[in-house]
Image (cartoon, helix red, strand yellow):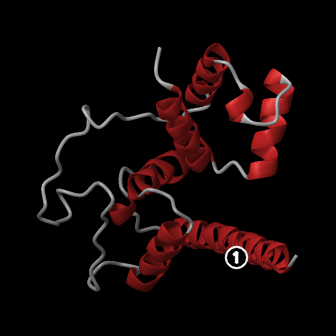
Amino acid sequence: MQNRKAMYAKIAIARKQLGLEDDIYRELLQNKFKKSSAKDLSDNELTRLLRHFAECGVQFVSKKNKKRSNTSVNPHSRPDWIEITPSMPFYSQKKQILAIWKKLGYSMSSLDIRVQREFNCYSFVWLQEEKAITALLTDLQKRERAFDKKQKENESRRITAENC
């Protein structure tokens, strides 16, 4: 059985990975365990909560299992790196897509997965169809506007809470 402090740390990691805001997290605890705080949960309940988060796709990586990364930075050593050069077709649109993708907090490797699923092209870098690039950029711009709106609402809530 893990110690409680480690379990609380894993719960914090899970909440961050899932993007659970406090009210939603408290509602989850209330629905699953009839309690409003993780501090009130038994060790068994904490384990069940962590198992639930794992089923939701949370990745718990221990320090022992982490590989040391190479300190040199290049496109091949970083899975979070996509290099676009000015000589590539649709350079400016691709740069916009990458900027928005990064702003939204998505991993760069997932961009290739999306391009592969949606447009049947193995890599984002190889995408050369104007219609596909325009569709992707339009979708990401909509997501960016929603993201900005949510950020603005959260900021105004935070300011309001600080002023109370």
**Which residue corresponds to the image point at 47% horizontal and 54% vertical from the top-left?**
115
**Which residue corresponds to the image point at 71% horizontal and 73% vertical from the top-left?**
151
**Which residue corresponds to the image point at 57% horizontal and 44% vertical from the top-left?**
12
Question: In this view of the protein, which residue sits in the foreground, 74 or 38?
Answer: 38
Q: Is residue 92 above or below residue 16?
A: below
The x and y percentages for residue 103 are 53, 71
Q: Quadrant of residue 29?
A: top right
Left or right: where 161 falls relative to 64: right
Left or right: where 102 falls relative to 24: left
The x and y percentages for residue 125 are 34, 65
Q: Quadrant of residue 66?
A: top left
Question: In this view of the protein, which residue sits in the foreground, 19 or 140?
Answer: 19
Q: Is residue 9 above or below residue 20?
A: above
Q: In which quadrant of the rendered image does the C terminus lie?
A: bottom right
The x and y percentages for residue 120 are 46, 48
Across the whole image, how many numbered discs are drawn on residues? 1
Question: In this view of the protein, which residue sits in the foreground, 77 or 48?
Answer: 48
The x and y percentages for residue 64 are 24, 32
Disc 1: CA contacts within 10 A as few (<14), some (14-19) or many (>=20): some
Left or right: where 96 falls relative to 26: left
Q: Amino acid at mark 1?
A: Asp
Q: Secondary structure at mark 1?
A: helix
Q: Is residue 127 above or below residue 23?
A: below
Question: In this view of the protein, which residue sits in the foreground, 79 or 66?
Answer: 66
- The residue where tag 1 is placed is 148
**Which residue corresponds to the image point at 71% horizontal and 24% vertical from the top-left?**
41
